[in-house]
Amino acid sequence: MSHPLTIRRPAFDFDGVSFHWHPSPALSAIGNATSFGAVAFERMVVHAVRESLPLIEDAELHDEAKAFIAQEAVHSAAHRSHARALVEAHPELGGTQDRVDALCEELFGGRSLKARLGFAAVLEGVLPAVARHMIETRDTLFEGADPRVSALLIWHFCEEIEHEATAVRLFQHLYPGSWRAARIPLALKFVAKFTRLMEREFSEHAPARQRRDRWAHDPEWRRIGRLVRRTALSPWPVYDPEEERMPEWARGYLARVAEGDDPVAAMG
């Protein structure tokens, strides 16, 4: 069963944002890398889903796919504004986005629609688990951080929960009987290459590798086990995204943003 997706267009102002927007250098680097990566990744997903539209025979899923495209396009634009602000503060990062874009083209440019949609279904299935963990630990996880970047990540990942099953439904509709888990090697290759690229790009601004302090702000280690379990199960048929529920706080947050509240103030 499809779910309606809401297109929200929150306004973010990253003027003067610091590279080290979080007390943890590693989490600062992860958040910054997310913005550079989202611009290229979301564009690839948008192109793949748009290419699939003429093939979708279910009218409801067709409408959902179009809304999914709109959401992903807004995500890309918001993260691009953050990345641009980082480049303004650190001109040496001026070529970073081009290199991330080139990496995505290298990995996905010549692949079939089935491969690209399968990859999207794998990654889109993993992200909501990360999102829930972020939401459940947000007060401590983002303590002392720049609220603008915190709100960007929270808003984006709340919407990842909202549309988490869309890519899976689309893949299953177009390729019934195929396993999206077959794209796990491609997903791992993407993550590994992207991580190495970001380590090189950020080597002059943050620790090249994610140091042990990356979870220093994480208040509940026991939740990591649930996060790992959800992530590991998400690409396989045994995992049903429909069984996952939007956290009540996230539902309220998205409603406030949809009503026009400033995404930072809406954090409460």
Image (cartoon, rainbow, N blue to C red):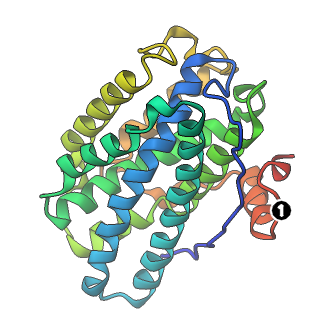
Q: Is residue 147 above or below residue 248?
A: above
Which residue is nearer to you in this view: 98 or 225? 98
Residue 27: image location, x then y, percent: 58, 24
Residue 210: image location, x then y, percent: 46, 16
Q: Is residue 147 above or below residue 64?
A: above
Count of numbered labels shown in the rendering: 1
Residue 123 visible somewhere in the drawing? yes
Q: Identify the image quadrant of residue 189.
A: top left
* Residue carrying label 1: 261
Residue 178 visible somewhere in the drawing? no
Which residue is nearer to you in this view: 57 or 265? 265
Q: Is residue 153 above or below residue 143?
A: below
* Amino acid at dot 1: Asp
Residue 234: image location, x then y, percent: 38, 46
* Left or right: 227, with 45 as reference point: right
Q: Residue at x 58, y 76 (%)?
A: 4
Q: Residues within 10 Å of mark 1 (few under 14, many from 20)?
A: some
Which residue is nearer to you in this view: 128 or 32? 32
Q: Residue at x 27, y 53 (%)?
A: 119
* Left or right: 56, with 143 as reference point: left
Residue sitting at the far top: 212
Q: Residue at x 53, y 38 (%)?
A: 87
The kind of secondary structure element at disc 1 is: loop
Q: Residue at x 59, y 58 (%)?
A: 159
